Amino acid sequence: MLNEMMFRPVVKPEVVEYMRKSQRFFPGKLGELEQMANDLGIPIIPHETAVYLDFLLGLYRPTHILEIGTAIGFSASLMAQYVPKGGSVTTIDRYELMYSRAKENFKKLGIDDVVTQIEGDAAHVLPTLEQQYDFIFMDSAKAKYIEFFPHCMRVLKTGGVLVVDDIFQGGTILQDESEIPRKVRKIHRRLNLFLDFVQKDEALKSTLVPLGDGIIMIQKLEEKDYLPIVEALL
């Protein structure tokens, strides 16, 4: 499985190389998991994004975290180290293979009592969640970001932060849709719709960060029902 995202960063190659090689690597089993994923080309967040999340969560210290897109469990494992006693990480993935691999890795890292895995399509799982979260990390099907967004906002606490990964598509997000291959036009169109929507909404505060294939950080400033709004857009 090729980790395509690793080869389409949105800043100069020499800067990416510097960020990936100069920043301290994670110690112990977490570092081993990152290295194994990179050696095998398994999709995980690139090192520069991981270091950024590590720094951010070290400051923020969220009690309850939700992740959409588990893969082999690297990012969930990274985030779990900052959850205080009584806190939790809930992570969703629809692929049985990823679920099984992640489960094994959580056990190896000794965090299986902190991490709750849910196997299933996030489109079906998210509407059923009742827990309120301080922090949400979304790294899943890019065309679904706009659909998942209202459900994320419903379970995100006011003042909480949603971080969404891979939003620039190697910079092609800036191109006209006619220049985009037909098979990925839906992703292109919906990512643009998502970015335009969240950056203009006054009930949100957001910032774009050019790490990896780009991330957007969104803070929820007030309660708002986004479901009917987004359904009307789609």
Image (spheres, rainbow, N blue to C red):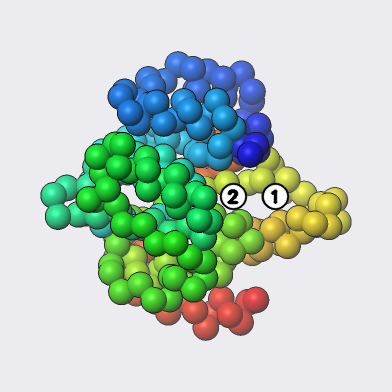
Q: Which amino acid type is marked by label 2?
A: Ile
Identify the residue at image location x=49%, y=79%.
227
Give the x, y percent position of residue 92. 43, 59
Which image quarter is the N terminus in? top right
Q: Nearer the viewer, residue 70 or 17?
A: 70
- Rendering quarter of residue 28: top left
Question: Is 197 above or below relative to 102?
Answer: below
Per the image, label 2 sits on a secondary structure element best described as: loop
Give the x, y percent position of residue 2. 65, 37
CA–CA distance between discs 2 and 1?
Answer: 8 Å
Q: Is residue 113 visible?
A: yes
Give the x, y percent position of residue 178. 86, 56
Identify the residue at image location x=56%, y=76%.
230
Please state if 171 lies on the left or on the right of 108 as rendered.
right
The 10 Å Cα crowd at callout 2, few under 14, some 14 to 19, many 20 or more, is: many
The 10 Å Cα crowd at callout 1, few under 14, some 14 to 19, many 20 or more, is: some
Q: Is residue 57 visible?
A: no
Look at the numbered discs 2 and 1 and tell me whether their residues touch, using CB distance below 8 Å: yes
Please state if 17 lies on the left or on the right of 129 as rendered.
right
Per the image, label 1 sits on a secondary structure element best described as: helix
Which image quarter is the C terminus in? bottom right
Q: Which amino acid type is marked by label 1?
A: Ile
* Residue projecting furthest to the right: 178
The residue that mark 2 highlights is 167
The residue that mark 1 highlights is 173
